[in-house]
Image (cartoon, grey):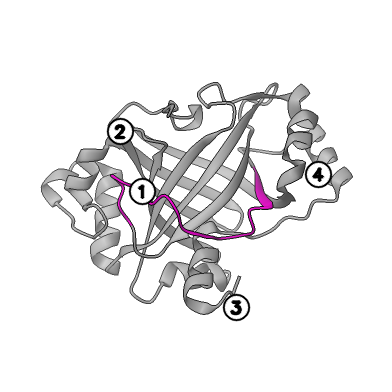
Amino acid sequence: MLTPALPKASALSSGERQTMNRFEVKYLVPTRSVPELLEEFAPYTKPDAHSPEWGYTISSVYWDTPDFQFFWEKVEGVKYRRKLRFRRYGTSTDVFVEIKQREDRTLQKRRLRWPLEQVIAAFGDGASRVNWALVEGDPVATEAALMIERLRLAPRMAIRYRRRALFGQFDPELRITFDGRIQYHPTDFSLARPFEEGRYVIDPRVTVLEFKYDHRAPIWLTKAICRRGLKIVSMSKYCSAVDQCYYGGQNT
């Protein structure tokens, strides 16, 4: 099986840290319409050069409090909120530790890229275990460790899906992603061996289309959205999975 390189947007050197501020908007589209959308966007975009033709797999483990504080903050529409996740692209030997902080529709993401073995040694694999000797001195790792200890965070949900990504041809800050076959697992949190089969978060006949940009969406994109009558959705893969798994899908 071909192991894809890390996508360009995540191409940090091992040990490197990154902070981003950007807007993110999501839409739900029929999976069968994805080829048509790719063709429509083609004159204004270019494929992620680091991705195979049919995209790459993303495996994430989300951490939360014993009473799912991060989940409920999303459900209740808290304007300022944070969440912690560990993300691995395909079978890469590196893992991203990410702290996502949202203020209304503006997102700030702080993340670091470490080798898989280093992340497991510092935070465990499938269980919370902070090794302070390994995280001290790195601001992102230290913030993650403080969140874990102060809020009693632990792995709560694993999410896995396939992504196809585009970049703006004339708007370098623009990133478009199509996330499909989104599955979850409520107990298998291994980063070394991500789960292969889980339950679907949403019907696989539906794909999550997301636009990420730093300032404003380009005119051609806003026209395409209006032309197709797409409606913004406030959809979190993690929260949808938690809701389905523990609350019968009543909240999302």
How far apart marks 3 and 2 lie (CA) works out to 38 Å
- Give the amino acid at mark 1: Pro
Picture quarter with the N terminus: top left
How far apart marks 3 and 4 lie (CA) works out to 29 Å
Residue of label 1? 194
Q: Which quarter of the picture shows residue 152?
A: bottom left
Q: Is residue 121 above or below residue 78?
A: above
The answer to whether 24 appears left or right of 185 in the picture is right
How far apart marks 4 and 2 lie (CA) works out to 37 Å
Residue of label 4? 225
* Residue at screen point 34% across, 70% down: 65
Q: Tell whether position 166 is magenta.
A: no
Residue of label 2? 93
- Give the amino acid at mark 3: Gln
Q: Residues within 10 Å of mark 3 (few under 14, many from 20)?
A: few
Residue of label 3? 250
Q: Nearer the viewer, residue 206 or 44?
A: 206
How far apart marks 4 and 1 lie (CA) works out to 35 Å
Q: Residue 45 in the image: state x and y as whole percent.
A: 70, 25
- Give the amino acid at mark 2: Thr
Earlier in the chain: of badge 1 and badge 3, it is 1
How far apart marks 1 and 3 lie (CA) works out to 28 Å
Q: Which residues are magenta?
A: 189-210
Earlier in the chain: of badge 2 and badge 1, it is 2
